[in-house]
């Protein structure tokens, strides 16, 4: 009975998400955290936050003041951020209202470039803020939850403890698991980047181009088949032997009187 309860199928375990090890493509699963997991994560956050503060790491508020004094952020930063956001929104709207394949492809690339430009501009703020007490502590909280939420297919924990996660030799697996857990907690799908307007548009363009290419190949094959058929018919007429005409002699019978 205990074994039957332990080895539940993925369908029976509601809320689990599957992801693959980037190195060997083995499946691992993410389950919802328990109340004890959340308490442990909050304790980890508090411990790392306090340790960072004691060691002189700046807080978010202090970092904002530093960036403001240095002119990294401020009215000009916010104005440029709005301009880039409006530009992205306008290009997305234009992309969603166009039908032509060539135009859709060009606009999808323009949207991708506009999104990257906005991301790079925001990094002027997000980069320094990632080194504050709050962000470092939040990273530790996420790592703790990752160590508790990742499971084997049978429901057993992949890492027995948080310390085991920190000692994980496969850096690719640890990073991938952490990323997948972050998306899970934020309510995002693993392929959320594939659902952006430009990604969807590029898929549509690719699908349309494939259809046109397939039709062109089929039309070419059909045309070639018709030409081969005509050549064959023409050759058969040319090679057909002429029938000789023969004249039969009339036989005369002597009639005896």
Image (cartoon, helix red, strand yellow):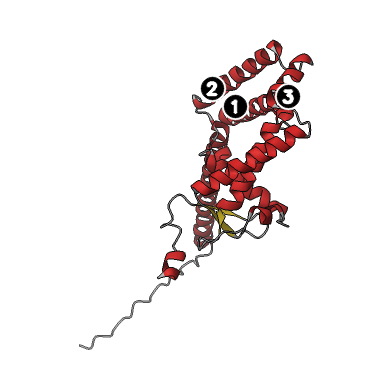
* Circle nearer the N terminus (1, 2): 2
Marks 1 and 2 sit apart, C-alpha to C-alpha, by: 8 Å
Give the quadrant of the C terminus: bottom left
Question: At 72% from the left edge and 31% from the top edge, which residue is drawn?
Answer: 132
Residue 186 percent location from the top left of the image: 53, 38
Front one among 72 and 6? 6
Whether 214 is drawn above or below 61: the answer is below
Q: Secondary structure at mark 2?
A: helix
* Circle nearer the N terminus (3, 2): 2
**Residue behind mark 1:** 107
**Residue behind mark 3:** 124
Q: Is residue 256 left or right of residue 88?
A: left
Tell me whether the residue at label 1 lies in contact with that at label 2, contact meaning CB atoms closer than 8 angstroms. Answer: yes
**Residue behind mark 2:** 94
Marks 3 and 1 sit apart, C-alpha to C-alpha, by: 26 Å
Nearest-to-viewer mark from 3 and 2: 3
């Amino acid at each position: 009975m205990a074994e039957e309860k332990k080895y539940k199928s993925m369908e029976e375990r509601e809320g689990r998400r599957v992801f693959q090890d980037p190195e060997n493509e083995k499946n691992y699963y993410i389950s919802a955290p328990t109340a004890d997991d959340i308490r442990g994560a909050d304790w980890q956050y508090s411990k790392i936050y306090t340790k960072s503060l004691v060691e002189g790491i700046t807080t978010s508020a202090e970092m904002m003041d530093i960036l403001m004094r240095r002119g990294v952020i401020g009215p000009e930063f916010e104005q440029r951020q709005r301009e880039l956001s409006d530009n992205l929104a306008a290009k997305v709207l234009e992309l969603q209202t166009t039908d032509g394949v060539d135009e859709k492809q060009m606009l999808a690339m323009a949207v991708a470039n506009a999104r990257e430009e906005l991301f790079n501009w925001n990094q002027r703020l997000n980069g320094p803020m990632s080194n504050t007490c709050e962000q470092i502590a939040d990273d530790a909280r996420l790592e703790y939850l990752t160590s508790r939420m990742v499971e084997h297919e049978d429901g057993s924990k992949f890492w027995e403890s948080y310390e085991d996660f920190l000692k994980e030799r496969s850096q690719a697996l640890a990073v991938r698991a952490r990323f997948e857990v972050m998306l899970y907690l934020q309510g995002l799908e693993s392929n959320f980047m594939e659902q952006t307007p430009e990604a969807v548009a590029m898929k549509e363009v690719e699908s349309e181009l494939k259809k046109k290419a397939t039709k062109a190949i089929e039309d070419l094959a059909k045309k070639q088949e018709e030409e081969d058929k005509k050549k064959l018919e023409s050759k058969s007429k040319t090679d057909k032997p002429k029938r000789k005409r023969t004249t039969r002699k009339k036989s005369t019978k002597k009639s005896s009187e």
